[in-house]
Image: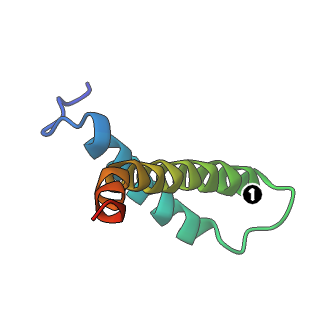
């Protein structure tokens, strides 16, 4: 029987949780042999981590844009 989760995660918290899981799996899978199921898993986790990092950094740029624009006009 499945247990109920003790904590619910949504949105950014879930994304961050999955990102940290991806980093842990990447550490475990580093050094795997080429053309193996482990290599495919490594590629998948790396893709997830890259997507998260890209989204975080692109959001930083969006949030910083108004402050940078205000500074240029002073």
In the picture provided, is 36 more to the left or to the right than 13? right
Q: Which residue occupies the extreme front position in the image? A: 74
Determine which residue is flagged by label 1: 39
Residue closer to the observer: 16 or 64: 64
Residue closer to the observer: 19 or 40: 19
Total tally of numbered discs in the picture: 1
In what element is the residue under mark 1? helix
- The percent position of residue 3, horizontal first and vertical second, equals 20, 31
Q: Which residue occupies the extreme bottom position in the image? A: 31
Mark 1, other Cα within 10 Å: few <14 / some 14–19 / many ≥20: some
- The percent position of residue 31, horizontal first and vertical second, equals 71, 75
- The percent position of residue 46, horizontal first and vertical second, equals 62, 56
Q: Residue at x 49, y 56 (%)?
A: 53
| Image quadrant occupied by the C terminus | bottom left
Task: Name above or below for residue 50 compared with residue 8.
Answer: below
In the picture provided, is 37 more to the left or to the right than 12? right
| Image quadrant occupied by the N terminus | top left
Task: Name above or below for residue 4 compared with residue 67.
Answer: above
Residue closer to the observer: 8 or 56: 56
Q: Residue at x 75, y 57 (%)?
A: 39
Colouring of the image: rainbow
Q: Residue at x 63, y 50 (%)?
A: 47
Q: Residue at x 36, y 55 (%)?
A: 69
- The percent position of residue 18, horizontal first and vertical second, equals 40, 48
């Amino acid at each position: 029987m499945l247990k109920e989760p003790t904590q619910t995660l949504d949105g950014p918290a879930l994304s961050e949780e999955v990102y940290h899981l991806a980093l842990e799996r990447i550490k475990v899978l580093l050094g795997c042999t080429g053309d193996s199921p482990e290599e495919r898993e490594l590629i998948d986790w790396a893709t997830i981590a890259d997507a998260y990092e890209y989204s975080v950094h692109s959001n930083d740029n969006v949030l910083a844009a108004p402050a940078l624009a205000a500074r240029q006009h002073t």
